[in-house]
Amino acid sequence: MRADIMEKIVSLSDGERIPELQQYLSSLTDDQAFVIVPWYFLWMLLQCWSMVSQSVCVHSGSLPSAPEGASRRLLLYQHCIPLCESGDLQTEVASDIIGLLMLETHNLPGPSLAQLASLFVDAIKLGKMGSGKSLELFPTVLTALAATEALSYGKGELSGEEYKKQLINSLCSSRWDPQCVIHLTTMFRDVPLAPEELQFLVEKVLRMFFKLDLQEIPPLVYQLLLLAAKGCKKQVLEGIISYFKEQDLLSIMTPIIHNLRHVEGTAILHIVFAVRLDQELGREFLKSVKGSQGELCPFSIALLLSVARIQRYEEQLFDFLKGAITKGFKDEQLQQGSKFLQDLLPQRCSFAQMILDTVKNSVFGWDHVTQGLVQLGFILMDAFGPKAGPFGKTATEGANATAKTPTQQACRLGGQVLLEGFKMHEPIRGEILEQVLNRLVTKTASPVTHYIDLLSDIVVSAPMILLESSSKVTETFDHLSYLPLATVQGLLKAVQPLLKVSMSMKDALILVLRKAMFSSQLDGRKSAVTGFLLLLKNFRVLGSMASSQCTSALSFMYSSHYEGISIGPFTCDLSCAQVQVDVHSRYNSAANEAFCLEILSSLRRCLGQQADVRLMLYEGFHDVLRRNSQLASSIMQTLLSQVRRYYEPEQDLLPPVKLELCIGAQGDQVFLQEPLAHLLSCTVHCLLWYQGMRRSARPNAGGSDDDDDDDDDEEGGFQNELQSILESITRRMIKCELEDFELDKSAEFSLSSVGVKNSIYAMLVMGVYEVLIEYNFTKANYSKSLFEELLELFSRYNKLSEILKEKSGKGKSSKSPRSLLSMGFVSTLLTALFRDSAQSREEALLVLRSSGDFLRYAVSVALQKITQLEETGHTDGPDGQNTDKTFHHLCDITSVLMWRYTNIPCAVEDAGKKEKRCSVSLLCLEGLLRIFSTGQQRYPARVAQLLSAIGGTHTNCSHSQCRALFTQLSGGEEDFNSKEAQLLVNILSVLSRQLEPSSQQFVQMITWTVKICKETSFEDVAFSKGLLSLLFSVHVLYKSPVSLLWELCQDIHSQLGDIDQVPTATDRTVSPGNLTDNSLQMVILLVLSQVGKVLDEVDWLITKKKGQLVPDRLSSDDTTQAAGQQDPVEKALTLQLGTLLTALNELVQTALPSGVCTNTLLGELSRTYTILTTLVKYVSVKLSGSHLTPQCYSFITYVQAKLLRETKAIPNLIYSIEQYEKYLITLSKKSKVNLMQYMKLSTSRDFRINAATLEAALQEHDNSQQVSINHTTDTYCIDDGDLKL
């Protein structure tokens, strides 16, 4: 039977006998047509039916509307749809069937369309739309359905459009099979949707994201972006970003993290492509990003950087990122400095960390992000790098310096982004290196230390990678002669590891340096010296001692004097930084030796150039010797020959040096030609190092005795001669009087040529004396007679120093010349003077200890060295650039100074010379302050080690130091020393930063501070300001300071009295301190400053809460919160402002002194009312209305009476109060709650009636019996400052 039916239909179809085919098909029962007919015959039947339908519709138009035809057609649809979804059909056949069904859909009647649409909805709910092929038909069905006029729905009727809405609502409210989500999203692109329908659909699709596999997300994102062309663009973008943000949190440290990163990369590409084609989508993206700064994540940042590659969005997005980064750092800084904010808001992942996470994530094929990262890194470094100060100077920031300000942190973040990008992505390495080098060459007028630090980090982290771009570095060498000296030094130091692995780069540098040696520019020649010294340090000749051996040799010279003395519990690795990469581990030592000797030959030419060039050479020779000991003979011979030029060999002649040869003249200008003191200093340090090295190496010498004797004969000549010269100079310099140098008290030190010459002579002579002091102390071996000679040297030095101070002129600050003593020697000397208790050395050291001037000199030089270290990151003299050694010396000095001050404070020194001798302890105290500040700035990671130098662990040490210093601070008033007290407070402020605010030690420090404040009479303004600042700084890290402010305001009120009263001496109340008239204004301003900080915190919190309003409204959890339950942040703000209002209420009733105090208070009151206006919903209206506002108007009247002049602060305050009241009235009407019951409306302040003037006018009117109206200002006083705006 099946075959007969098939044969009949085929014959009728091929013969195009349409009427007969139609009649035959109509005669078939449903079972015959669809049960016994296979799928391929069903497709042929469908084609035949289509031809029949077209023919019949053209001729009569009656058959499709017949019930039998409609039913048969619907039955055909019902069989075709499951068949296409079954997967049994070939794709082309299924597409043809769906296409034919689409053509016939518009012929179906409304009920059939409704049934067909319900069929689709039911199939979707049951998960029967696996392939989604038949879903292509669903939009056509819905479109045809929407065009139907009326459809039965339940017991009534609905229009086709409403029926469609019901279907879509039912569909989006039901459960979707994850497999059909993408197909449904694709399908809805072709369905006309109302805005609310589209929003409902988008929400449904976004919820389905979390039920899909990761690999299905990118195509769904693509389809969703296409769907967003209809609308809901912002919702789509925010939903996608929110999904990936949550996935980042869920997938961290899981195996799927790699898959997630690849999926994120693909999704970013889809979004960028869509934004590139749809400008409206791009605008919505910008709005979304700018409105959700606190909700950014690594994915959204990566998306931002990718979209920024589109030119029309580039400037806006990078400006946004710059602002967001600095704002993030400012927010972190504000939150870290306030316990109140820390308790209210949890610490979130920093914006900077999210950017660094984006850099790490970009390794997963995010090539479209890397270019934006490079651009962002350079934008941050360019915008927030160090700026040139006055006269082109800038504060030197070492690599270890802590970035303190938000701009410094942003600049450092830019460098980190570029460094990590350079390590991870090969395609951008060349661009990063080229841009860094270009900035070093072109930015000659501004500091480039941040770019040098970046280049150094790149070289250290990836030297072999950098060699691939060595040509770019070589090109930069050509500009060395024209670059600032600081840039040249930094650049050469940064690329130094490359010179050891690249012969071509080294050769190129040498050629450039040789040319620069003969440059007409002084900086060019100095750059040449810098480069040659660097090469000598780093190309060691075979046989040179290791750095650690060289270090121990010199350390022996100083440490041998202190056997058995404990000066600190640490051992420090003093070896120099090793080159990170050295492929030539077995280098050619002979070639290196010839190379180094050739460089030395070039450097000898510098000995005939300007003093600045010679000075650089002298300062570098010691480091060369320490790193390349085989060059000792050549260097020492060079120095010896130079010393001979200025040494007077005749033993009977004084002075022993030829100062006239050190001076040059050109016209009427006199200048320094030879820095003789630095020459002798270099010679002494090199000689001491060489002798120590020989002494330490001799016991381990592997050669024969004959070889050693030969070496001694060969090299002992310059040793003996130099020792003889130094001994002769010492002996004769002791005999010299100032007249021998033409520098007696009558000498002129003006700006004339004679005065300049005398000044140069004086500096040279003082430097020579200092060099001899260090040399003779080292060689004295604690001989009493030699120490007496040393003291004679110092007395000559001190005498000349006093003359220079006297001649500097009254009222001028005479800055002491920089000492030539080395940091290591200063540490040794202080230890000997203050801590050495060995019995065998006591007699000799007593000679030095008996001189108060020498003690002050030693401590003042230490202070000078510490100050230089704090400002520049290094010190003059040997190993001044060595960070480890310098830190080691700093720890020793810290231990000595702390011991000296705590054991011999000012109060126990000689009372007869108290004023003079107290300066030693004050210098120790000032040195400690500088040391602790330097440690936090230059050695932030080693502060614990620095504090441990004094004894104990980090925290306990800080606590014990604070306790010891508080003990000194709490002495009696008769022992009070203003400068000492200020220094103690400043040190305590620095040390308090090392205590954990949650620790018991920190609480104890607050207790001590409050105790000192209560016991101290605030007579000294500077000390009082420092002490109260310390109190506020530690209190704000423990809890909110508003209660403390209230107490202080009460004390100020009791001290000054009410604005309508005169205070008495018995009106004092409880206070944290005893205020005096001298310090009262300072305390008021300090309190108001703290009030301003509290208002800043409140304002910041309000901004944060506003930013969270939209996410909170979208959260279903928040909407179920009980209406009476107040948000914790809002509650905390209410309490904070309530206490602050009480404190301000005290101040506005106080008769404050006119001027800056009243103006500042008016300004803070205006800010307070502005904030109250914002928070009127939560803040106690009763407190502000019944207490503060009336007192404010009384205070305004008081201020106007005191000032008798206009001030802008008064109308600003009045405007803020009236805006507050206006908002209260509006809110009262809307909420039906009388918020004004505690408020007394402000009196109209357009004018005021002067009562006294009015009374006089009325009296005059009664006497004269004349009716007159006087409109002059004698009758009505109109205050323009009170006019409403």
Image (cartoon, rainbow, N blue to C red):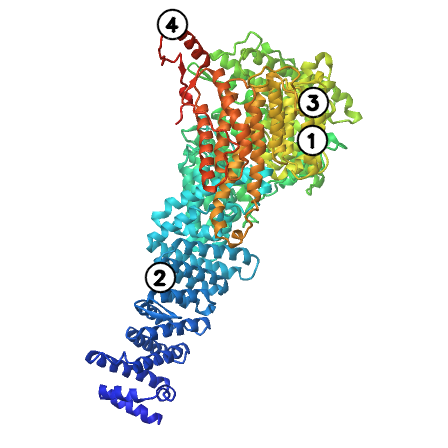
On the picture, is 417 further left or further right than 970?
Answer: left
- Which callout, 4 or 3, points to the residue nearer the camera? 4
Name which of mark 3 and mark 1 comes first in the sequence: 1
Name which of mark 4 and mark 3 comes first in the sequence: 3
Q: Position of residue 956 (x, y in %)?
A: 71, 36
Residue 195 lies, with reference to residue 849, above or below; the image says: below
Residue 369 visible? The answer is yes
Q: Nearer the viewer, residue 508 or 891?
A: 891
Q: Position of residue 11 (x, y in %)?
A: 26, 90
Q: Which residue is mark 4?
A: 1264
Q: Nearer the viewer, residue 1102 or 512?
A: 1102
Q: Nearer the viewer, residue 925 or 1194?
A: 1194
Q: Which residue extends farthest right? A: 839
Q: Position of residue 83 (x, y in %)?
A: 39, 79
Query: How far apart are labels 3 and 1 at the CA level?
Result: 12 Å
Amino acid residing under circle 3: Glu
Decide: few, some or many residues near mark 2? Use Cα within 10 Å; few <14, some 14-19, many ≥20: some
Q: Secondary structure at mark 1?
A: helix
Q: Are marks 3 and 2 in contact (CB under 8 Å)?
A: no
Residue 145 lies, with reference to residue 790, above or below; the image says: below
Name which of mark 4 and mark 2 comes first in the sequence: 2
Q: Tell me what residue is drawn at x 44 percent, y 37 percent.
A: 1226
Q: Which residue is mark 3?
A: 1015
Amino acid residing under circle 4: Ser
Q: Which residue is mark 1?
A: 1007
Q: Which residue is mark 2?
A: 193
Residue 715 visible? The answer is no
Amino acid residing under circle 1: Thr
Q: Position of residue 177 (x, y in %)?
A: 47, 69
Residue 1199 lies, with reference to residue 1036, above or below; the image says: above
Decide: few, some or many residues near mark 1? Use Cα within 10 Å; few <14, some 14-19, many ≥20: some
Q: Tell me what residue is drawn at x 59 percent, y 30 percent.
A: 636
